[in-house]
Amino acid sequence: MSKIVVVFHSGYGHTQRLAEAVAKGAGADLLAIDAEGNLPEAAWAALNAADAIVMGSPTYMGTVSWQFKKFADASSKAWFTQAWKDKVFAGFTNSATMNGDKLSTLHYLFTLAMQHSGIWVGTGLMPSNSKAAQRNDVNYVGSFSGAMAQTPSDASPDEIPVGDLETARLFGQRVAEVTERFKR
């Protein structure tokens, strides 16, 4: 079985809920970046040992949180030795508005994965974009690049739309399936 980790920062708990859903679908371990942008040494060892790394950050001001950026900058040690080369990578994000420039965050995560010579996995999910679509449908936000969620700014983490959590779970499942294919 593949070793998958979900490394994420969550400012208010919304991104953590998504990380938990992705991890559930992927059978992954969670690695939380703390409020100061740090990971314990054991988390770095887990990243190095992983077959797949799924990255998550809230979208703040059109990109990742500064805590996630600090982690990304610290990953340059792994980059320098190409320690994560050919690992499977994927990413997810959440913001308060439907667009919220979430794609900029996913592009950032994709670029980081490419700098590490990784292999990117998208959602593999068709969008819910018909007139009959409902807010709690899977992939209602309509992302192919990675999982996206939208939670109103005054909503608690418990109020994340069910469809966004299911999208995250299915996305994690896809990452696990693709990772297994690459291990063959």
Image (cartoon, rainbow, N blue to C red):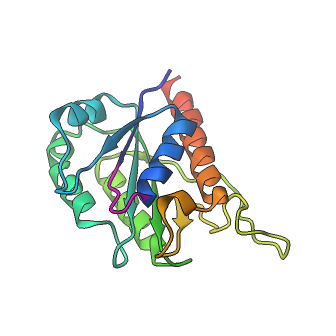
Indicate left or right for 164 with 79 as reference. right
Query: In the rendered image, is residue 17 in sight?
Result: yes
Q: Residue at position x 27%, y 58% from top?
A: 68
Q: Quick one: 156 or 181, which is closer to the camera?
A: 156
| Residue 178 placement (x, y as % from top left) | 56, 37
Is 12 included in the stretch rendered in magenta?
yes
Q: Residue at x 74, y 66 (%)?
A: 128
**Residue at point 48%, 44% (across, down):** 20
Query: In the displayed structure, would residue 34 be above or below residue 29?
Result: below
User: Is 71 included in the stretch rendered in magenta?
Assistant: no
At which x and y percent is residue 52?
42, 37
Q: Is residue 146 visible?
A: no
| Residue range highlighted in magenta | 8-13
Does residue 102 appear left or right of residue 171 in this picture?
left
Say whether residue 127 is left or right of residue 176: right
Q: Is residue 50 above or below residue 150?
A: above
Q: Residue at the location (47% across, 25% down)?
A: 2
